[in-house]
Each structure stands twice: as structure tokens, then as C-alpha cells.
Image (cartoon, helix red, strand yellow):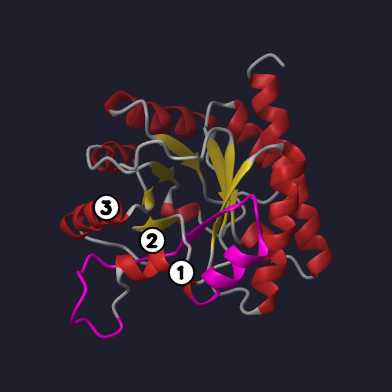
């Protein structure tokens, strides 16, 4: 686990996946950067590997993460993603074990160790409460609790799952941040998750699946505003 990580609750994760590429990724990152400053909310922007350097150079406030890496060391490994190379692009962290890029427990453990060695924060995806608790023992910085069957459906986790999965992680290590993901499509979904006790939430298709850039950019602003308003309400501000 990277000590002294800059990201703090409440925060939000945006992952364009392969819905966007090139200049469109950079422009969305700039919008996220503005929202991060406006609402004082940390944003993880999980950038396609090809755009990490461009996004890093074009922004000031967001935290740029890679969508994956492998656990190999410098040397052979054609087409594998070297941790040192990810760090050299300017990335601050890496996402691991997404349902679209799953890892075995052994490989996940090795990847987290390598991330720690090169100074990359880790955000690790988990499906069930049991998996989230098991992954917490590997000491990542952030765990994404998102039922696989809800990803991309527009249906968010219920309050019971949010509370139970957050508790499952915090009971193992209270310093691990918990992001409640899957099916986040609007202001209300974000607000409910944060108000229910999550450190963070995030969205991919709920933003980049919208039909116009204007709609995407407005949704970014709406969702980040929801993070701030829900967290402040939760804490009596």
C-alpha cells in the first residue's frame, strides 16, 4: 500500500474504457479537471494507456490512473505492461482486476507488490463482499465494490450492498478506501451511494455512453456536485 496517498474521501472515478480515444479522452479529462477544482472533490481518471501522458500534461487536479498493468520486471515480455513504464508515463496509480481484465489471486498479489515497489497507488475491483474482504488482505489503496452483473446496466447497488461491502473491507483494514461502483447513471445514484457511507463512487457508460459531448460534460459536473453535496450532508455540513 502506498503510504501518504494524496486521494481522500470523497472522491470519484471516471473510466472512458474504449468508448473514447484520442482527443476525446483528453477533452473529457479537462472537464473532469475543472469539476475537481470547482467542487473540491478528488477524481481518479482511469485513462486508456495510449493517452496517459497527454492527459497528465493537459490537467492539474485529477489523478491519472492506468487501466491495467502486469507484474513482470524489466526485460522480456513483449506486449506485457511493465509497472516501471506505467510510472514513467506520469500515471499516479493503476486499476487491477476489473471484470473485463480479471486476475488470479496470485497474479493480483504480485501486481500489487510491484505497484508498491514503483510507487503506483492501486485501485482493485471486487464483485462480492467476500471477495472484497479477501482482497483487503492484499493491502491495495482502494477497493472498488461493484457486482459484475450491474456493470453497464444503469442499475446501481442497493443500500444494503453498499453498507455490507464497505464494512467487509473496513473490518479488515480501515485505511483502505472503498468505491461503490456499477450502474451509476445520474446525480441521484451518486448521492445515494455517498450518503450511504461510501468513500467514493464512479461511472463509465453513465457518462461516456451519453449521445453528445455536451451531455457527457454536464453529467460529469452533475455527478461531482452530487459527491460533494452528499458527503457534506452526511457529515452535517
Q: Which mark is residue 60?
A: none
How many numbered markers are drawn? 3
Residue position for label 2: 99
Helix, strand or loop at disc 1? loop
Q: Is residue 72 magenta?
A: yes
Do residues under tags 3 and 2 come within 8 Å of each other at their CB atoms?
no
Q: Is there any visible trace of residue 156 in the rendered image?
A: no
Near-viewer residue (189 or 71): 71
Q: CA distance from mark 3 to mark 1?
A: 18 Å
Query: If you read the primary sequence from the N terminus, does the residue marked by circle 1 or circle 2 appear first?
Result: 1
Near-viewer residue (111 or 236): 111
Q: Residue drawn at (27%, 28%), measured in percent from left and top?
A: 172
- Crowd rating for badge 2 (residues with CA inside 10 Å; few <14, some 14–19, many 20+): some
Where 73 sits versus 40, above or below?
A: below
Q: Residue drawn at (28%, 36%), measured in percent from left and top?
A: 133
Where 174 sits versus 150, above or below?
A: above
- Crowd rating for badge 3 (residues with CA inside 10 Å; few <14, some 14–19, many 20+): many
Amino acid at each position: 500500500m502506498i503510504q501518504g496517498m494524496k486521494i481522500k474521501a470523497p472522491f470519484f472515478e471516471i473510466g472512458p474504457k474504449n468508448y473514447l480515444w484520442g482527443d476525446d479522452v483528453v477533452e473529457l479529462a479537462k472537464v473532469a479537471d475543472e469539476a475537481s477544482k470547482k467542487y473540491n472533490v478528488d477524481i481518479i481518471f482511469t485513462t486508456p494507456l495510449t493517452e496517459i501522458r497527454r492527459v497528465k500534461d493537459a490537467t492539474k487536479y485529477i489523478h491519472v490512473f492506468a487501466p491495467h498493468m502486469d507484474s513482470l520486471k524489466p526485460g522480456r515480455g513483449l506486449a506485457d505492461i511493465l509497472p516501471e513504464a506505467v510510472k514513467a508515463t506520469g500515471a499516479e496509480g493503476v486499476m487491477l482486476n476489473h471484470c473485463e481484465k480479471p486476475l488470479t489471486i496470485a497474479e493480483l498479489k504480485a501486481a500489487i507488490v510491484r505497484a508498491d515497489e514503483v510507487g503506483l497507488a492501486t485501485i482493485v475491483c471486487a464483485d462480492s463482499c467476500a471477495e472484497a474482504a479477501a482482497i483487503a488482505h492484499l493491502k491495495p489503496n482502494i477497493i472498488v465494490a461493484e457486482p459484475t452483473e450491474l456493470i453497464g446496466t444503469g442499475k446501481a447497488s442497493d443500500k444494503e450492498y453498499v453498507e455490507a461491502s464497505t464494512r467487509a473491507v473496513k473490518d479488515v483494514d480501515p485505511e483502505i478506501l472503498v468505491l461503490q461502483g456499477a450502474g451509476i447513471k445520474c446525480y441521484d445514484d451518486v448521492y445515494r451511494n455517498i450518503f450511504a457511507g461510501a468513500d467514493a463512487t464512479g461511472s463509465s457508460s453513465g457518462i461516456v455512453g451519453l449521445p453528445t459531448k455536451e451531455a457527457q460534460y454536464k453529467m460529469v459536473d452533475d455527478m461531482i456536485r452530487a459527491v460533494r453535496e452528499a458527503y457534506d450532508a452526511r457529515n452535517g455540513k
